[in-house]
Amino acid sequence: MSNISLIIEERAANIGNFMVGRLLPFREKRAVGPFVFIDHMGPAHLSDHENMDVPPHPHIGLSTLTFLFEGSIMHRDSLGTELEIKPGAVNWMTAGKGIVHSERTPEYLRHSDKMLHGLQIWVALPKELEQMEPNFTHVEADDIPAWEEDGVSYKLIAGEAFGKKSPVPVYSPLYFIEIKSKEAKKINIGHHLFGESGLYILDGSIKNGEHTYDPRQILITTEASLCEFEIAANSTVYIFGGQPFPEGHFIFWNFVSSDKNLIEKAKTDWTNQTFPKVPGETEFVPLPEPRIK
């Protein structure tokens, strides 16, 4: 019997110089465990006059996780952080009661051809931590737990699983795992997982029962403990999930909260520009038309 309850196709959207593929939220599935938003950026070929320039914009009630496959992004935030993220490293920014950040192509790459490809993820905070003080953590690629088993390569990018723990400081029980294989293999890891679980196919394919699934699809399991599939040769997949929260979350733009009043306050604060400022930045992204999901 199949362990797949829902298949979500990546939905492309143009955000300027490159495309993003929206994976979560989806009308039939607003969250998987604490994961409430996943965007697949690129792969985008940017010429010498094209750059990533996302001006300062705010967040509340969540942690963001940026994980690049190719390219580079300069992160600046209202805590005073200024740091370049490169492939394989993790930027983990916890907004709590409010943070502002910008994302731009680093200066040394702005006049050359370049690639940009990666995942941007939002993880909701537990209700009792939604108004915590904001913070930022950068974890280098070499510090992320990585191992090989039966010819399959694993990375525990965030959370806890397989008896291992990532140094990314998460705030609820979760996992974000990379699995790569050069050969066709059977993967049976359900006994390492818990809560709700999703699987994103980046490259290659997987087979579950009689069905084969290709890149740019998310598969949502009916039960994480039954996570078993066949991975094709030269494939890369990401498994994410964890314990869902008892309360639901509302999403408006970059604001996530279990309390609509906190979202309304954030909207007013951003309109009045009373959020903290990003040093060295003068631009900002205006508040969009209201629509709470």
Image (cartoon, grey):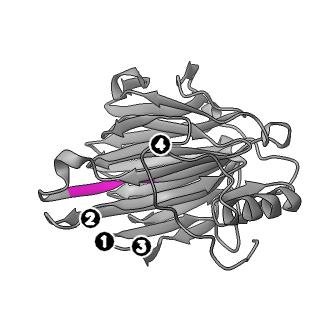
| Foreground pick, 4 / 243 | 243
| SS class, disc 4 | loop
Percent from the top left, x then y, of residue 136? 55, 33
Which of discs 4 and 3 lies nearer the camera? The answer is: 4
**Residue visible at 38% across and 64% down?**
215
Quarter assignment of residue 287: bottom right
Identify the amino acid type marked 1: Asn
Cα distance between the residues tagged 2 and 4: 28 Å
Identify the amino acid type marked 3: Ile
| SS class, disc 1 | loop
Residue 44, numbered label: 2
Q: Which residue is mark 4?
A: 279
Please tell me which of labels 1 and 2 falls first in the chain: 1
Q: Which residue is mark 3?
A: 15
Do the numbered discs 1 and 2 sit on residues whose CB atoms are within 8 Å?
yes
Which of discs 2 and 3 lies nearer the camera? The answer is: 3
Quadrant of the image containing the N terminus: bottom right
| Foreground pick, 62 / 27 | 62
Identify the amino acid type marked 2: Ala
Identify the amino acid type marked 4: Pro
Task: Look at the image and tell me whether residue 207 can be seen.
Answer: no
Cα distance between the residues tagged 4 and 3: 25 Å
Query: Main structural element of the magenta stretch: helix, strand or loop?
Result: strand
The span picked out in magenta is 115-119
